Each structure stands twice: as structure tokens, then as C-alpha cells.
Image: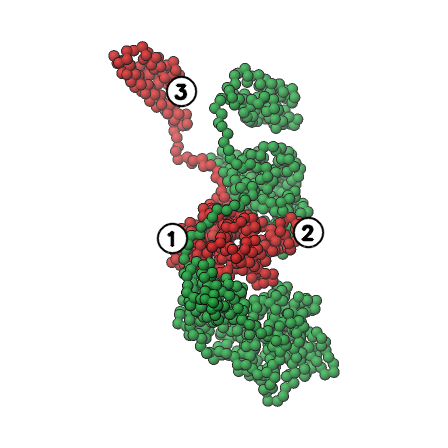
Amino acid sequence: MKITYSWIKELLDIKVSPQALADKLSMAGLSVELLEKSGDDWVYHIEVTSNRPDWLSVNGIVREIAAITGAELRNSAYGKGQRAKGKKILCSKPHALCKLSISIEDSKDCAFYYGNVIAGVKVGPSPQWLAKRLEALGLRSVNNVVDITNYCLMETGQPLHAFDLDKIVSQLAGEPVNQLKIIVRRAKKDEKIMTIDGVERILNENILVIAGVYDKTGQPANRQTGKPIAVAGIMGGAGTEVSGKTTNILLESAYFDPVVVRRGSRILGVASDSSYRFERGVDVSTVRRAIDRATEMTKEIAGGAFVCAEQAGKAPAQAPRKIHFCLSEALDTLGMEMTASQAKNIFEKLGFSVGYRGGKDSFLVSVPTTRRDIKIQEDLSEELVRVWGYDKIPLTAPAIKPFALDVPPVGTLEARAKGLLVNMGLKEVITYSLTGDEDYKKTAMELGANLLELENPLTRDLRILRPTLIPSLLNCVSFNVNHNNKDLEFFEIARVFGAEGTSKGPETLSLGIVLCGEKRSTWQKESKRYTLFDIRGMIEALLEEAKVKNYEIKKTESMPFAQKNTGCEIIAGKDTLAVFCMVNNDVKRAWGIKGKEDVYVAEVSLELLAHRADLKKSFSRIVSIPSIIRDVSVLAGQDAPYSRIKALIESKADGLIRSVSLADIYQGQEVPAGQLGLTITIEYGCASKTLTDEEVNSVHQKVLGSLTGELSLKIR
Amino acid sequence: MPIDYSHIADEAKLQIEAVADKAALEELRIKYLGRKGVVAEFMARIPTLPADERKAYGSGLNDLKNKIGVCLAAKEAQLAAIVSSAPDGYIDVTLPGKKPLLGRFHPLTQVESEICDIFRRLGFKIFDGPEVETEYHNFEALNIPLEHPSRDAFDTFYIKLAGEPVSRLAGSTGKLLLRSHTSPAQIRAMKAAKPPVAIIMPGRVYRPDSVDASHCFMFHQVEGIAVDAKIRFSDLKGILIAFAQEMFGQKTKLRFRPSFFPFTEPSAEVDISCFLCRGQGCSVCKKSGWIEVLGCGMMHPHVLKSGGYDPKKWRGFAFGMGVERIAMLKFGINDIRLFFENDLRFLEQF
């Protein structure tokens, strides 16, 4: 809503400067977004909250300024419109246009409708003051008649419309008029209208229209339904627009249902100054006042004669809403003090009338019809403090008491995992949860059946709630590689949606990791290429932190983006806790990840991991009894991979093992193809005593024996 | 009679200084100070001496032990230095240090954690609500009726359902959507705890806004509520000033302006005094000296009721803020898109 300083001054005897007034308005809830100098005037751009349709007019804002500043209202030249006398032919000779009838199909859609006919207007440019005033508010001056309806809309907040009366007729019959009928009704499906912005609109049953019907003597033309001449409360039709040739006009002022107008405006994708106000609810008592005002102005500025006023429906008698208000309760909630007479004074300045009911603490407040937003005690509290000043409320410290609120395990795990991954040197990324088909195509993925899609996406690229983090992470790699950063380590923890195999609801928490290129070092030669075992190690560190032990790592073909033989899954019980792999070249190419850098990705279901995690920290005694180290070198292959060797060593050592770890891997001339030379370090020890050499040798021999026996390994 | 050990000390010193490696040094340590070493040998004689001589004899021995110890330590340090230096003894100390590869939290996570931590210290607990919400929780429960202009502030993404998953969301009736604010978490948090409560709800939210320098369809909010029998608006002001001074500096001032949110009554928008120009007026605060950072108010009785709290017995205050906005202000970032591009050169700055 825009308003000018000069307009305010014309209506109100105020002494404050334009800037000071802007501050006052902002502090009273009429947030001034911009105060703009325009010639010798100032324009206020005010953001009006949706609960205050009464502020969508100059009169409403001026009323508020009077309340908050105590300034007196002036009687301006156009102060109060005089009641136009209806059904009285005021032109010199009796006019056929006086026969106007209006019918409303459903009073729920339109409670009442006024139509005033003015004959013999001279349409032309507006007087300068009018054009200037509208232009200051950002409205284009069209012609005097249209400008007057816009002026009255701005002044009173009631949207008005002017039809070219002769076109309502000729549109249907092209014949002279002797009786005119206006119907307010719902549109038929696929009915069409060209609106004044030159767009043909296709209507449906949810949209309310004004239809015009011409009755030629003896030959009723479509009398029941007529033809749409305006989209009610939203926009007029081009066919009945007031132009330079117009001589007779029909002025419209009505009360259209807020929900119907809102729905229509949404369906058509058209919002206008009119629809904006109807949606928020216009003041019932202003509907008449506005049309009278516009009629008077038209006669004065565009000439012509007021022929007749017709109406359909009746403005409901609206009694002021009465609210019981307990002042002590209000002040206790606000934490401030105020006397009963101060409170009463504020209410009265706002136009509420106040009576005491049994004691000065209990008020009965009557709220004027312009303030439909005031319904309960709390609404009145806000009015008090709004005018009194929020700055007068003191600062107090609340006593926040202890209370119980369960934190789901996944919440704790999320925080722990984030810290752990950052400690590993990974950078956290945040990517969009919304994705498109192209993302999955590039990742060679088929979309699953549980997919969640948006009904109203911004674009097709953002229509899918992602079931996996991996495409988003590849996107991050692509962006950075193409900005010449080829060495990357990223992770994201975010919700994924409709993922397979989750029962917790449509969203679950997921961790994604991507590694690309090398782990950078300041001394560049010491940078090391990331490998599959780096990403695996990161997940294993997380599993260790969560004290999850019973899991298996298996090869899987489930990842279509995986390089052959690199896809792995981590399984615990029935759950696949995580997957990881090296990304294949086709997918890298599809994502525009150029260069020779290897890319590794992993995804961990934190939801599933949380069920198995033990995040309590506890201390286990540090063993000071020395341990004894033995190394063993073997050739491992397909039939006896490291995991089997390790498991076998652990099972054969009579509980005398502290740890089994990988010391070295070698592939040289002496190692046959398809095999790997492994050096494994076994740490023997016992919690209760120091093992003797004999004891260690005996168990070590047993271990070696089983390696050569059960796994047929060659010990080197 | 005191014994002169100085010749032993001198001899040890010469031998130690002549040593060239750690192993030889260790041999000498054992020779002099070991369990069966020279010093130990002399020590063993103490019990055989007359009582009045033992003291002088002993202190002389201790002196010897210390002298040898100092020599050994000095030599050890010398040897250690040689080992870590280049063979020719030249060290270029201007070579760059080997910086460890550092991980980083995303700047939005950093700001969100900072906000949450401050409130945690004030006695609040954290609660996570779902991103896929029901229309009821996002709107009706929060006093935002269907087909009402108050919904205009909350343009929302709706979810198309191919069928099945509706029933999987607790309390699901009607349409599913991506929450357009964190406020629906208020309702879920109230249902998860008995009053009095003080709860912080951070998270991602979504609105169908086209992306530009200051808008994005996905962003982050932090929401808070405190409910107690006699909690007041003045308490809300107290909590928010405590928060703002921790977050933006001890000299921060707050300004409360009347506003409208369907779920609070009275409602206010809160400005902080501009921490960049200290109220002098700059481009960030649009020359006003104030920056809008959050919205707040007393919880509407309708909302308390939706959460299962009797509004006749309980009152509450609520507040909410945008994480991106605060991060942009704090770090001087001028384009919201930078947060989601995840450029390494951006991420490594925080």
C-alpha cells in the first residue's frame, strides 16, 4: 500500500515531519518499507499485514495515524461523499437506461451488489491533481472515469468498477437498450472472457462472474445466464471497458466473498488491487459510501447525469463485536503496568467503545466493523501494547524449569557423526533436497516406486524429493572440478525421502561422503590419492564410534554408478547400513567430471545405524601388561581374502590376541597375478599375566598351522 | 671422610661427549647410572660406613649422579637434533609447515549450532520435526485457516502421492507438503513433552521462490517456544536480548515492532541495532541503524490447544529466525546461492 504525505496532510492536521511519521507508522505496525521523495511530496511504501485490510485505504491509514498521534481529522474538499439519491432521474429527459435489474445467484458468493447508472459522461483525461495523485501511488492515469474508480478504491479501500453501459448491450445484441439486467453468478466450465489486460481467460465453476443480459422486446437473449462481462472482484472485461467513446456508464460496488475471490484469483493467476482487497475482506459499511462518492466525483469531473441506483441483496446489519477484556490478565501476560483509564483511552482512540463491567479491571469492548481482526482478549492486548509502545515492556528473565524431552538416538548420532567427519578433514556441504530426473539419469539410476514428487514444482529439475544424497554430491564434485579444484573431500547429512527399506516414515536421515583426487598435503609430493580404502575407513571409523561390531562388508552390484568390482555394502542383520564404491567413468562423464581423478562415494543410513549404535562412552582399563608382536607374511587371494585370514587368526588364538592388523601389502614379481602379498601383525597378550615366549610360540604355531592347513596359504 | 668423586665425573663427561650415537650413549648410561652401574656400586657401600660419615658420603654421590645425568641429557638433546636435521646440518626454516588437512562445518551449520547452543545454555532443549509435514500441522494447527490470505506468506510445495506412503506419517490427515516454516514442529514438540517446556527447533524449510541473490526455495530456520503458567512477554524480551547480545555482541540493542503472525498474539518483529555501523547507518541496515532478524510473540491460544496444552492454564512465547539471513549478516555474504553451490573456496573460509 502506498500513500503520500500530502494526501495525509489534506485529511489530517499533523505536525510531524515525513521521516518522523514514517518511524511512528513502523512502530505502530504499519511497516514503512520505503519513504520515497517524489517532487515536492513523499511516498510511503507500507507493508500491510494480512490481518489489517482496513489499512488498505487512505482513510484507514489516516484513521490509524489520528489514533497514534492524536491529530485531528480535517474536513477535506472530498471529505465525506454525499449520499447519491437513487431511482431518481436527474437528467433533463427521461432515460431508457433507468431500467436496470440486478440478480445474485447465490448470496454466499455476493452478499449485496450496488449499481449506479450515470448517463452522458464525457470521458477524457483526468484533471491534473487526480492524475498526479494516482501516479504518485504507482497507478497509471487512464481516463477520468477509470481514474475516479481507482481514486475511490485507494481512498476508501472499496474496489469499484465502471462498465461502458452501451457495450454491455451491444455485446449481446447490437441494438438500442431499453432494459438491462446484471447477473452475479458462477462461471460455466470453459466459458471465456477477454479481460482488460487483453488476455483471454478460460473460466470454470469456481470463478464468480458478472454477466450482462440484454432483453430486446419480445426476444429474450439468453436471459437466464447472460454473458460474462467481468470476473467478479478480480478484473473487468475488455468488451465493456470505458473508452473515449463511452457516454453511459454503470458503476459497480459490491461485497464479494473473500474465499471465492481468492480462489478465482489463484486459478486465473491474476491478482489486482481489487482482488487483493476482496480476499482480505472489505468493510460492509463502506460499500455504499464508496459508490456514492464515486458517483458524485464522476458527475463533478466527467459531467453526466446520475440516472438510477439499483441494488440486489442487502448489506447485513453488522453489530459491533463485543469482547470481554480482563485488564489485569492482559498486563500480567505482557509483564507491564498501565492504569484502567490509560487502557480505556487507547481503546477509544482506536474507535472502540469501552464499558466497565463490575470493577475497573473488567472491560466490555465494542469493536467497529472495520476491525474484523479483533476477536479475543489477546487481540485487544496487542492493540494496547501496539499503541502504548513495545519498548515500554520491561526485560525480565524467565525461570526456565527442567523438563523431560526425549532425544531420539538418531539426533545424538547425527551430532557425533558430523564432528567425527570434520575431524577426518571432510568439508560439510549443504545441497538441495529437490532434484530432477536428469540427476538420476546422469547417475545411471532408476527411480524407485516409493518416490515422493512435488505437485507444484518450480521447475522439472526440482520435482523429486531425493531418495539418495549421491547425485547431489556428484554435482558438488562436478562444480568444483570445473572450477579447477580437483582434490575434494565432502560430506552431507540430510533427510532423504521415500527411500527403499525404511519404515520410519517418508523421510530418514542419511550421510553421504564423496572423495575425489588426492588428499592434499602442503608438500605436494606427499599428497596421496584417495582410494576405496579411505572411504571405507571413514565409514568403519563411524561404525567404531557407534560401537557397532557385528557387521559384514560384502561386494554388491546394487550401485549402477559403481566401477566394476568396487561396489560394497555393509550389512548388519537384515539392514544395509551403508554402501560405497568408486564411481565409473560413464557416470563421471555424464556429470562433466573431467580429468583422471578417481571419485569415491558412500552413503550411510544414520537412521538404521542409530538403532544399533551405542553412543555411551565408557572407560576400559588400560592394560599395562606388555604384549608380544609376531608378523606373518602370506599370499592372499580370491579364496582366502584378508577378512577370512583375520577371522581365522582371531578364532585360533585361544583368546590370547590383542589385535590383528595389516602391516603391509606388496605386489611384486614374486607375487603371482590374482594374489596379494600381505604382512599381518599379530599382537599377543593376556589381561592377567605376561605371556612367556613359550606360550606365545605355541599359540603362534597353532595360528600358522591353521593358515596353512585350513586356508592352504603359503607362509613366506 | 668425604670422598672426592670429581675424577669419576670428569671421566664420565669425556666419555659421554665422545659418543656419536644413541646406542653408545645408552651403554654409558647403564655403565654409570644403571642398576649395577658405578654410582649404584658406591651406593651399596653406604650401610657399611660409620653412621656419622654416611650423610657426607651420600650427598657427594648424589652430586655425582646429577652431574652425569646433566651430561647425558645434554648429549641426548644434541643427538636428537642431528637426527632430525639435514645430513649437512643445514635446515631451511623458511620451508612451509606441513599443515594438516582441516575439515569444516558448513557455515550454515556453524551459525545454526551457535544459535542452538546459546539457547541450550538458557535452558532450552532441541527438537527435530519432519520436513515432510501434513497440511494440518503446517497451517490449521497454527491458526492459518484454509483459503485465507494469511497463507500468502507461506507459499508451499505440495507432495503428489502415487498412493501408499501417506499413512506412514504420524497424525497424517489430508495433504502432505514440505514444511514452509519450522513452526509445525511447535505442535509436535508440545505433544512430545509436558509443560512447562522450553524448546528449540532448527531445520530446513521450503517455499516455491525462484532462486536469486536473496531468495531460495530451500532455507533454514530456528524456531523456539517456552511455555509456563505465568510466562510473560517481558520474559520473551529478556530471553531475546540475552540471545542477541551473545550472538551479535554485548552492546546489541533490540527494537520490537508490532507485526502479525497468525500463530502469535501479540506479535512483534525484532530488529537488532546494526552491528556493522553501530547505528550510524550503512548499506546493510539501509541507513536505518536497525536490522530485522526475527519474529516473535505470545503463542496464540489456538496453537497451545493444537499442541494439547490448555490455554487457560498455560501461556507461551514463540520466536523464529532465518539462519541464512543471520549467516549473511555475520559473515558479510551478499548472495544466498553461495551457501548451496558448495564451492571449496567458499567452504574453506569458515
Q: Is B66 placed left or right of A85 in the picture? A: left
Report the residue that reaches farthest toward the right.
A218
Residue ID at (32%, 20%)? B66
Identify the residue position indicated by label 3 in the image.
B21
Identify the residue position indicated by label 2 in the image.
B162
**Colour for chain B in the figure:** red
| Chain in green on the image | A
x and y percentages locating residue B213 in the rendered image: 51, 55
Report the residue that reaches farthest toward the top.
B48
Q: Label 3 vs label 2: CA separation?
A: 78 Å
Q: Quadrant of the N terminus of chain B?
A: top left
Name the N-terminal-most of marks 3 and 2.
3
Residue ID at (48%, 46%)? A402
What secondary structure is marked by label 2?
A: loop
Which chain letter goes with mark 2?
B
Q: How many marks?
A: 3
Name the N-terminal-most of marks 3 and 1.
3
x and y percentages locating residue A492 in the rendered image: 55, 44
**Whether residue A649 can be seen here:** yes
Residue type (three-letter) at the residue carrying disc 2: Ala
